[in-house]
Amino acid sequence: MANNITRRQVMIGGLAVAAPLAALGAVGCGDDDDSAAAATSGSQDHAAETTAAVEAGPVVAPRAPHTPFPAEAPPRSTTRVHTIEFEVDEHLLEIAPDRTMLAWTFNEPGEPGRIPGPVVRVTEGDRVDFTLRNTGTLQHSMDFHAAKISWSRHYGPVDVGETATFSFTAKIPGVFMYHCGVPPVLLHIGQGQQGTIIVDPADESLLPPAREFVIVQTDLYPGKNGEISDFAQLEAATPELVVFNGYASQYTGKDALKIKKGERVRVFVQNAGPSRWSAFHVIGALFDRVFLEGIYPENLTRGSQTLNLSPSQGAVVEFTVEEEGTYPFVSHDFHDATKGALGLFTTNGEST
């Protein structure tokens, strides 16, 4: 079992978010039954076996210094059939200044693995042909929440060096999670094997043109640098860091997200967990349109101050800002904002 988080590691996590929080203060406030039992067990014995397998593997050098995860949403697709291929990568990944973790990630071939995985965007009624190549050192799998297909037929573990494929039609518009489903699922998601798929509604009038971003909240439980996550902390849901798009407070300073006064801003928000709730809030703005889960007219809410999402839930929020300035976005569970769930929107004097 991995060692507990040390006081030094907690201090490093605190230092990673201290400056942005100061800025925030200045700005403003087989058999299905048998298979199901095995997949949901999440036993510590299994976690210990996984830990031993990882620690027995080769030490992987850290990647290049952190560059911000692209928060801008990919454009709406005009393709009706999507061929998506992910590989598994297990490597050291920076998650805060001077803080790395052993990350298990999904990535497109030839691209670096990051937390979260690549944003997938399709349209209601599109077909997705998916392939997972297990290029890691452990069993991994894929579970798309946007798919209405049999778990027992398609979401089984993929052995090292093997490939699995399946297809589905994206029938429900919304913001959905994807993740590894190999037990203990808590550990695989906690190590970084999760991401977001946006299913746009076929009715384009429901999401008219806007400046669009994707924000994925994740709670992280890194062990010592280069080691597997602390499973006891995972079980207790006491993360060292809670982050947007894989890195503590990354959208601050020169990396703040640029918007314009009077411009419609749309954010696809996903809470990937694995365990913490998200209370997404933009200080100085109100959400004049919110689609919680399915993007349907009957799901539209107006005048929301905070978006509450349980682990795995997704939503769309829209807002405009009426004055030039900086608008922090946080999880209004400030226990998590102090751990890195903080970023900034800024107009930089621009307007529509």
Image (tube, grey):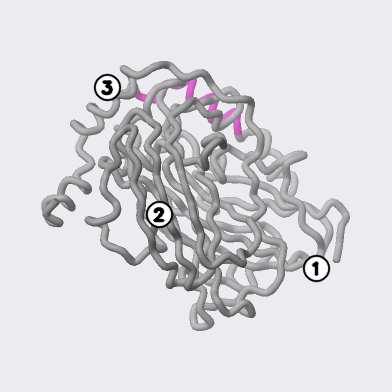
Q: Determine the residue located farthest toward the bottom in the rendered image.
A: 298
Q: Residue at the spot x=54%, y=78% of the render?
A: 300
Counting residues from the N terminus, which is met first, the one under dot 2 or under dot 3? Answer: 3
Range shown magenta: 4-16
Q: Is residue 156 shown to the viewer in this render?
A: yes
Looking at the rendered image, the disc whose residue lies closer to the viewer, 3 or 1, is 3
Q: Residue at the spot x=49%, y=55% of the render?
A: 83
Q: Which residue is mark 1?
A: 262
- The CA distance from mark 2 to mark 3 is 28 Å
Counting residues from the N terminus, which is met first, the one under dot 3 or under dot 1? Answer: 3
Secondary structure of residue under mark 1: loop
| Residue 248 picture location, percent across and down | 58, 37
Tell whether position 12 is magenta. yes
The quadrant where residue 56 appears = top left
Q: Amino acid at mark 1?
A: Gly
Q: Which residue is mark 2?
A: 311
Q: Which residue is mark 3?
A: 52
Q: Amino acid at mark 2?
A: Pro
- The CA distance from mark 3 to mark 1 is 54 Å
Asked if the residue under mark 3 is in contact with the one under mark 2, i.e. CB atoms within 8 Å, the reply is: no
Look at the image and tell me in which quarter the N terminus lies. Answer: top left
